[in-house]
Amino acid sequence: MIRAVIYSTVLPAIEGLTALAQSVGITPVAVITPRAARDGDGEQRRNAILAEAPDGLDLCFAAEKPSLLRLTEAYEPDLGLCTGYPWLLPPEVLAVPRLGVVNSHPSLLPRHRGPFPWAWAVRENDPEMGLTVHLMDAQFDTGPILAQGSRPMPEDVTLEGLIPTVRALSQELLPKALRRVLDGDRGDPQPEEGATYAGPFGEDYAELDPSSSRAELLRQVRAWQLTFHESRNGPFATVGATRFRVLDASLDDPGDSEALRFEAADGPVWLTSTEQR
């Protein structure tokens, strides 16, 4: 039996990794995930994993990164499966599974390495949404490629709009990648040409500029949504004499008295959800 441990914080990803691994003869035995932060989102993710993770998986909540080594060693895995993980796995953890650790990264690596690939793909108006399955090494998203593919970028560039595309890509690519690993194939080295880093947004992208087009401003709002916990840092808009953090926007008048009208270069954008600063 080929035993695998899963590193993830996302219940749908855990469910998907489990099913796709089983489809090629791999048996996931445990999920090793960071202990949830003491906030609403963290508690919700933890409770979802506790209540709904697939049967047959042990659930391990690591208090800190040094716990990963002893937890991984305890399960004597042949393989690690990773996606949606906030911690860089240390080399000593990567060395435990004899077949390595396979990661799924939602971009066409080496483009958009790092923690916020979706946000940068939306910010830069990429025509395609990619997924790369690769073996992990000591750096973020630099290991050899096992499988890669893309689809046209969905019109709805929200989390809810992007998930079906990445799910379809994962179902196509992950079994191919796992079969390569089982056959002893160590993948193809990534080129450095075209490499970019998808880190947190800075102040240069934090303010809605009225000289921008409506489409650019909506894309800016949606890109910030995809930075998740970093989204508290932007974007901001000034309407009248009041400054707001913008949580969502629309190009169509929602007919809602609570929505704020923001004038762009080519017409209005409606700020449908805001917080006063």
Image: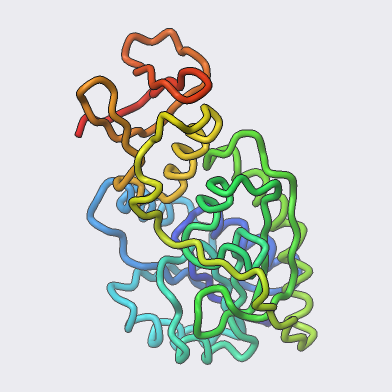
Q: Is residue 154 left or right of residue 64?
A: right
Closest to the observer: 10 or 118? 118
Residue 201, picture quadrant = bottom left
Identify the residue shown where x is 50% and y is 66%.
Answer: 114
Kindly indicate the quadrant of the structure image that contains residue 245: top left
Q: Name the residue located 43 percent from the left edge and 42 percent from the top edge.
A: 225
| Residue at 38 percent of width and 52 percent of height | 45
Query: Looking at the figure, which quarter contains the C terminus?
Result: top left
Locate the N terminus by quadrant: bottom right
Looking at this view, is 218 or 21 the one in front?
218
Quadrant in the picture for residue 141: bottom right
Q: Nearer the viewer, residue 224 or 103?
A: 224
Q: Residue at x 65, y 69 (%)?
A: 194
Place of residue 60 in the rendered image (x, y in percent of width and height, measured from the top left): 39, 71
Is 81 or 259 nearer to us in this picture? 259
Q: Position of residue 111 (x, y in %)?
A: 62, 65
The picture places residue 144, in percent across and down from the top left corner, at 67, 80
Q: Is residue 126 left or right of residue 253?
A: right
Task: Return the x and y of residue 147 as percentages of the image width and height.
Answer: 75, 69
Model colouring: rainbow
- Is residue 22 depicted above or below 214 in this figure? below
Is 233 above or below relative to 26? above
87 shown above or below 234:
below
Number of marks in the rendered image: 0
User: Is 1 situated left or right of 32 in this image?
Assistant: right
